[in-house]
Amino acid sequence: MSEEIKNNYSADSIQALEGLEHVRMRPSMYIGDIGVRGLHHLVYEVVDNSIDEALAGHCDTIKVIINENNSITVEDNGRGIPVDIHKKEGVSALEVVMTKIGAGGKFDKDSYKVSGGLHGVGVSVVNALSVHLHATVFKDGKIWEQEYAKGKANYPVRQVGETTKRGTTVTFLPDDSIFTQTIEYNYDTLASRMRELAFLNKGIVIVLTDKRVVNENGEVKSETFHSEEGLVEFVKYLDQTRTPIINHVISMETDKGDVPVEVALVYNDSYSENIYSYVNNINTHEGGTHLQGFRMGLTRTLKKYADASGLLDKLKFEISGDDFREGLTAIVSVKVAEPQFEGQTKTKLGNREVVSPVSQAVADMLEAYLEEHPNDAKIIVQKVILAAQARHAAKKAREMVQRKTVMTGGGLPGKLSDCSEQNPEKCEIFFVEGDSAGGTAKQGRDRNFQAIMPLRGKILNVEKAMHHKVFESEEIRNIFTALGVTIGTEEDSKALNLSKLRYHKVVIMTDADVDGSHIATLILTFLFRYMRELIEKGYVYIATPPLYLVKKGNKKEYAWNEEERLELVEKMPGATIQRYKGLGEMNAEQLWETTLNPEHRTLRQVTIDNFAEADRVFSMLMGDEVPPRREFIEQNAVYAKIDA
């Protein structure tokens, strides 16, 4: 492609595919949902345009600003969206991009070889779902602007000045009549994604600023994300709290068969497999053909080396693919010109032509590393042998679990007080800390649809346990059995079978103190490592019992935090205050009206927006520090009146 064609980014590069008429009527079709996730997706759509400019070699700095009113500004130093007249549409190309769904340079291969973004819906959808959007273009020495209300232009594109700058600035305010839950942006959620983008696109500078937060010196909160090593730094970041067992992060960057492939991996002393795959900067957490290629290349190359080393000679059973991935943290990133996504959430890559290039690239990388680092190679093979032995032991332990589950006709755990309803969609199970609270919960619940399962003390910390130890744990076996799920198939020993799941609300109910938070986090860690699909499907919740009962005469009110307690004391002078140190201190009626009754309770739904970051957080939380553990539970459970 000549430089002249490559840089001729004009109105003719823009192809309009269809209008915006359905976006406001059916927003979830375009951005996934209209809750917190969809709200943040608006930012990602605009940032994706700037990332595409960077991938094309025309932009190196992107600024994302959360303004005081929760509007968002995204600014880049790219070529600037074209403003000349679009021949087919008869209006400025800027207006076409902003008001026509699917219109953009991404559909013109002369402008962009690859482009990011999961839905590919473009900035026009952001415009349609905003009460106000202001676009400013700095191009060819001139400043151009246009403003919109709910996707419609307020006036034609106009020139408003001259400049030496270049790039595009977009400011938008989400429409609170569509995003009815909230239009308040979460800084940490945006920071997590910006950090990820910086790792995935080394050399790019992304600055995130939150004008809502100002320190005592009058400085606004701001963070700069920039990575020179890219995926190597990403792997080191994810593995901060794990101990590597080899001396280097193994990495490569190549272009095999027109598919740019980047891989970085390291082995650590953990027992979990943490592989994160990306296509055009989007986390494909359901995997796909690029992950298939990575696994093939890894398994084939390590198996060949292990066989040749003679270290496997005394092993009495076959090594499986899983064994090569235990204790592995890896990032696989590919760029695909026309990605085809499959799966329920459209995050599984389907392009068959990607398998071979990724597999070959990984094989070449590993062969070279193993040859140059024989000591590391021996350590990896020894780790694989240990994993195989643990898997063999875990298989026996897992079979014991499965014999006891409802799937195979076994009985339910003795401590489970089940509900009478048979439809899983209507059923709830509460995992409760200890027999005392369990007894109160059993008395206070609605037996028709609420089941209670008391857990004895702190369950096993699965982050630090080998797989067979997990399945040998009685408390964990009881959780599997109570839920009715099984784990492990011949093809994938970590596959979860939810076909017999007995409850669609799995609620963790622990005391509102440090020990309770620790127990809740241990359960969450177990669910994340062994039943992640429950979290992905939105089945996992945390109950929120009150901290105080404020009582005066016949009048009583509950407080869930210190602020509410102070308000009630002011409203009810002379009132007596009871501090609930644990769930067992409530009577059955109090527990029902505050924590169990769907009409009055508040459940916090556990969601995961960024799986790589969640992996890092769970790994970090299993240390001895209590504050970050408590902070995680407070920040990562979305407060919502689920049943209202």
Image: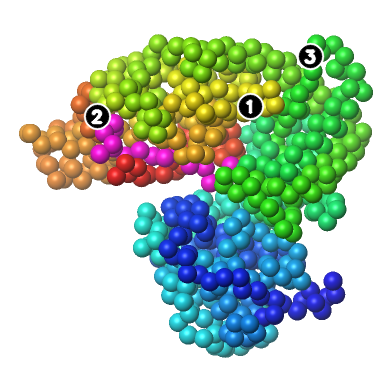
Please state which amino acid type lies under the numbered disc 2: Trp
Residue located at (65% from left, 23% from top): 489
Please state which amino acid type lies under the numbered disc 3: Phe
- Circle 1 sits on which residue? 494
Magenta part of the protein: which range?
A: 595-611
429 lies left or right of 95:
left
Marks 1 and 2, how far apart at CA: 37 Å
Name the image quarter holding residue 448. Answer: top left
Residue located at (38% from left, 16% from top): 416
> The residue tagged with tag 1: helix, strand or loop?
loop
Tag 1: Cα neighbours inside 10 Å, few (<14), some, or many (≥20)?
Answer: some
Marks 3 and 1, how far apart at CA: 19 Å
- Circle 3 sits on which residue? 317
> The residue tagged with tag 3: helix, strand or loop?
loop
Residue located at (48% from left, 22% from top): 484
258 lies left or right of 41:
right
Residue located at (72% from left, 70% from top): 108
- Circle 2 sits on which residue? 592
Tag 2: Cα neighbours inside 10 Å, few (<14), some, or many (≥20)?
Answer: many
